[in-house]
Amino acid sequence: MNSDIVINTKWTGNPAEQEELLTREWLVTNGLGGYASGTVSGVPTRRFHSLLTAALCAPQGRFVMLNQLSELVRFPDGSSQKIGGIELVGGALDLHGMSSLREFRLESGLPVWRYELAGHVIEKSILMPYMTNTVHVGYRLVSGTGPVRLKLRVAVHFRRHDASLVEGLPLDSYDLKASTGRIEIQGFSMPPLRLYVDGENPAFTIEAKRLSDILYRIEKQRGYEAQGNLWSPGYFRVDLAVGKDVTLIASSESWESILALSPAAIFQAELERRRCLLAAARPELSKGLAKQLVLAADQFIIAPVERIAETAHVCETGGDVRTVIAGYHWFTDWGRDTMISLEGLTLTTGRQIEAGHILRTFAHHLRDGLIPNLFPEGESEGVYYTADATLWFFHALSRYIQITGDRGLLKELLPKLLDIIDHHIRGTRFGIHCDPADGLLIQGDPRYALTWMDAKLGDWIVTPRRGKAVEINALWYNALRLMEKWTQEENLSSDATEIAKHADITQLSFNQRFWNAGTGHLYDVVDGENGVNDPACRPNQVFALSLSHPVLDQAHWPSVFQAIKNRLLTPVGLRTLSPDHPDYKAIYHGDLRARDASYHQGTVWPWLLGPYTDAWLRVYPEQRKDVRDFLDKLLEGHLHEACIGSVSEVFDAEGLFAPRGCIAQAWSVAEILRVWVKVAENQTSG
């Protein structure tokens, strides 16, 4: 195995070290949307932290099933020591494992802890077998006089993973079945949680107890219910000796599935799967931290098990359903995020077949010229309030065709693509239509935020952007030019001629309407609220020069790029608003209202480094080494913090640029991965 990231965790009691152990997190996924996640310290700090969050069929969605294990090691001399930790309401923070934790590392992307305990070295690891709702927690005695005795207390609270800590199954309503070292914990209308220990002399002791007043500190910081309780049916005990590994298996699958292969065989199969992922990826990604991004990308590509009817329909036609989880822990699959992420997650990593499945999956859900904005948790039908996801679909399809040469998919989808163009010209839902006066795309519905700047709390839309938004029209022009080319290639000359006329009008109007000579950059929205043009300097204008068919006149490229660089660029991404704007917020923190108020009002988004890099290389192609140095510095600094080995959703706009939001975000990983390869290609060709 390869140690991709290694973190020395020897704790001296320094408060800064303690904070790092509590804020550094890990993530393991199963290809279904399920996951295991926690902190390096072992202290759960989020309601989403668990050892098994299973992806169940609709209407259940993702459910927390195994919350945590309390782990105790008993030595031959009768002494014992706990590993892990917990925080209780009232400020009692118990880091009982930190004094013995010496190292945390990712091996082939999987988390491994190394403890030194009373002359013994014990390693703990976690993996989820691919495409199953199962977790393996492994223990290995690396050195020391054994055997030692492990005591593993199981603690649960079945609830949907995004539910409040006070929701879910009451703690007095579980049924327990125990036989021959196996146990089943049954909750109402839920598949049972099945557990057993593979090792020397395992046994389970029934000793039910309630674990009360657990504090989840990040939930408190984010303004949510932060106190929870767990129920424990008892504990496993097992001997751990050198050369004889122990694995606790927890699963919502059948016993036949769970016991089909040994833990050792499953571990080797997962390692081989990961080796194949790395081998299939672009050769530029075979070394260093970029290799870790390939493994991070794998976490977002899933088969959505809850959409049974769709899966059955697609499988009948010889296909397969694939989609992209937008971010862990709380996002589902979003159309916009998926289309932006498609190239980085799949096409740079050699997963072209899955890219085709993803495009077909979203095309299957096309309604009134729109692909879904998102699929809500536990539901099989999407919701459609988005003005840009469908336009990103054209971009994703274009990249797919260019890289794979798959003209068959284009022919299959061409009628739907023509229907999308027709709906946008004539008008479709949410006020999305082409203005006949200037050919620009206009959108707006007072109930929704339709662009990617979509923060909304109740009736309050933080950045409404109703009107003609700059990136919507850059995407619209790009889609028209792509359709012009595709219809020409498929000998649909009348369609190509008509589409070309629309593209010409759009390009002319865009440059007349969006260029702001007084500021040297583009208006963010024209014909906005009360007919006003919005002169705010936002990153949305970058798409006017970054897409395959840039709508902005080349004469304005340097001015617009410099405005973005000087006012929005940070070491971790682009600010969403210039600091000189009265609505600018420097910190993304606090309760939901405070966070939504800053979400797109200054907060930095790393995914924007993708289009920013495209624009950078388009305007200054000779600066590719500067681009590579910038990206390398970001990876070296960030992949060792927050979610180790992945890229966060957002960052503060100033100060230390603290990572915030989701700990692992699909388009953050995808866009950095994509442009990292692009820069490496340029260096090779240069």
Image (cartoon, grey):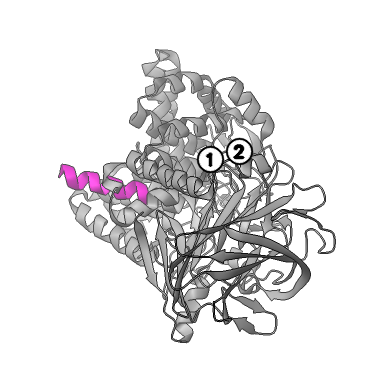
Residue beneath the point at 65% across and 55% down:
196
Amino acid at dot 1? Ala
Farthest-out residue, left: 686
Camera sees residue 326: no
Q: Which residues are magenta?
A: 672-686
Image quarter of residue 2: bottom left
Estimate the x, y position of residue 335 in percent, counting from the top left. Answer: 55, 41
- Distance (Cα) linking label 2 and label 1: 8 Å
At horizontal 63% and vertical 30% (from top left) the residue drawn is 311
Q: Which residue is mark 2?
A: 372
> Residue 440 location in percent, x, y?
49, 37
Q: Position of residue 190 (x, y in %)?
A: 77, 48
The kind of secondary structure the magenta stretch mainly shows is: helix
Whether the residues at callouts 2 and 1 have beta carbons within 8 Å, the answer is yes
Secondary-structure class at tag 2: loop
Is residue 357 covered in magenta?
no
In the rendered image of this protein, does residue 177 appear above or below residue 391?
below
Give the vertical position of 300 relative to 107 (above or below): above
Vertical side of 354 occupied by 682: above or below: below
Q: Which residue is mark 1?
A: 389
Q: What residue do we see at 17% from left, 51% from top? A: 622
